[in-house]
Image (spheres, rainbow, N blue to C red):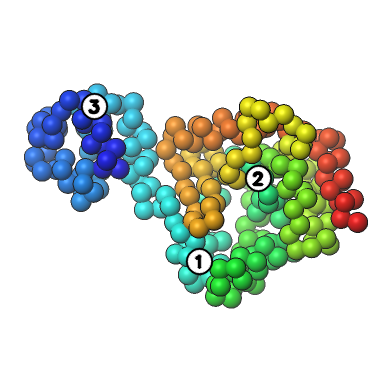
């Protein structure tokens, strides 16, 4: 954050002392902000960009500053007491969101998962990361969160790569139940389920990281080691544009059901 502000100031041709004088600050304030010793308030960032002629960056800078602590959270920090806390942490976000958009290239997204699929997935995470065993409680929290599908005026747009339908989580029986559940959920009026066929022309946009977009306010990405939260408006817009491009590659309705049914048949 400080480095970015320093670059903005230098691009404007101002010294730290000149900027502090124009903003009515103590002359050391710019140095403290740029060296990370002081967290800038929203008004500080507005003044910074105003006097540096960079008001077009104000919204992104404010979003960055507000989200510095939670932008990159390691799983080992979030899950140090078990999986339940991580499941509970997103409940407020889910409750206030009205438009959900999700893209996945390997996993059926959380709200659409069956209990058996959830249990197999979380058990694998627990064992791989050697976490405290609160599996039963974590599964219940995740299943309870799925009520957002049926409560209030919420809309869900979900895009799955066809390969997601073939990745086995929990064995053939669990996958058959999960895929059958997808067929059922696809009939709900507030859920749009698209499947991107393996045969789709990926010249313009190949598979990217899995992500969730919550309204137009936030994007979440799960990495191998950490949980990433993106709130900068220009980055959120880029994810929204990627989602739109991916949606254009997907098939829906009867065509999507055919791909899901084929995946069920492949389980034998």
Give the mark nearest the N terminus, 3 or 2. 3
Q: Are marks 1 and 2 in contact (CB under 8 Å)?
A: no
The label on residue 11 is: 3
Q: Residue furthest bottom?
A: 133
- Residue at mark 1: 79
Q: Residues within 10 Å of mark 1 (few under 14, many from 20)?
A: some
Give the mark nearest the N terminus, 1 or 3. 3
Q: Residues within 10 Å of mark 2 (few under 14, many from 20)?
A: many
Q: Residue at x 21, y 43 (%)?
A: 34
Circle 3 sits in a helix, a strand or a loop, which is it? helix
In space, the residues marked 3 and 2 are separated at their CA atoms by 40 Å
In space, the residues marked 1 and 2 are separated at their CA atoms by 22 Å
- Residue at mark 2: 104
Query: In the drawing, does residue 243 fall left or right of residue 59?
Result: right
Query: In the drawing, does residue 175 fall left or right of residue 246?
Result: right
Circle 2 sits in a helix, a strand or a loop, which is it? strand
Q: Quadrant of residue 138?
A: bottom right
The label on residue 189 is: none
Q: Residue at x 26, y 31 (%)?
A: 8
Give the mark nearest the N terminus, 1 or 2. 1
Which quadrant: the N terminus? top left
């Amino acid at each position: 954050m400080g480095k970015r502000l320093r670059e903005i100031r230098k691009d404007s041709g101002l010294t730290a002392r000149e900027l502090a004088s124009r903003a009515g600050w103590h002359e050391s304030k710019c140095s403290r902000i740029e060296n990370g010793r002081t967290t800038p308030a929203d008004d500080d960032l507005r003044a910074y960009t105003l006097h540096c002629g960079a008001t077009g960056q104000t919204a992104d800078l404010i979003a960055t500053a507000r989200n510095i602590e939670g932008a990159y959270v390691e799983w080992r920090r979030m899950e140090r007491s078990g999986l339940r806390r991580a499941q509970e942490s997103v409940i407020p976000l889910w409750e206030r969101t009205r438009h959900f958009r999700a893209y996945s290239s390997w996993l059926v997204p959380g709200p659409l998962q069956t209990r058996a699929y959830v249990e197999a997935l979380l058990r694998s995470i627990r064992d791989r990361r050697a976490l405290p065993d609160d599996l039963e409680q974590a599964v219940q929290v995740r299943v309870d969160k799925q009520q957002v599908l049926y409560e209030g005026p919420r809309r869900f747009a979900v895009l799955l790569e066809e390969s997601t339908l073939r990745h086995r989580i929990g064995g053939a029986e669990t996958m058959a139940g999960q895929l059958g559940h997808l067929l059922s959920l696809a009939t709900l009026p507030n859920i749009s389920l698209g499947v991107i066929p393996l045969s789709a022309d990926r010249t313009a946009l190949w598979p990217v990281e899995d992500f969730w977009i919550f309204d137009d306010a936030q994007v979440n990405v799960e990495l191998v080691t950490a949980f990433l939260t993106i709130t900068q408006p220009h980055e959120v817009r880029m994810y929204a544009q990627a989602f739109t491009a991916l949606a254009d590659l997907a098939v829906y309705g009867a065509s999507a059901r055919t791909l899901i049914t084929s995946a069920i048949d492949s389980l034998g």
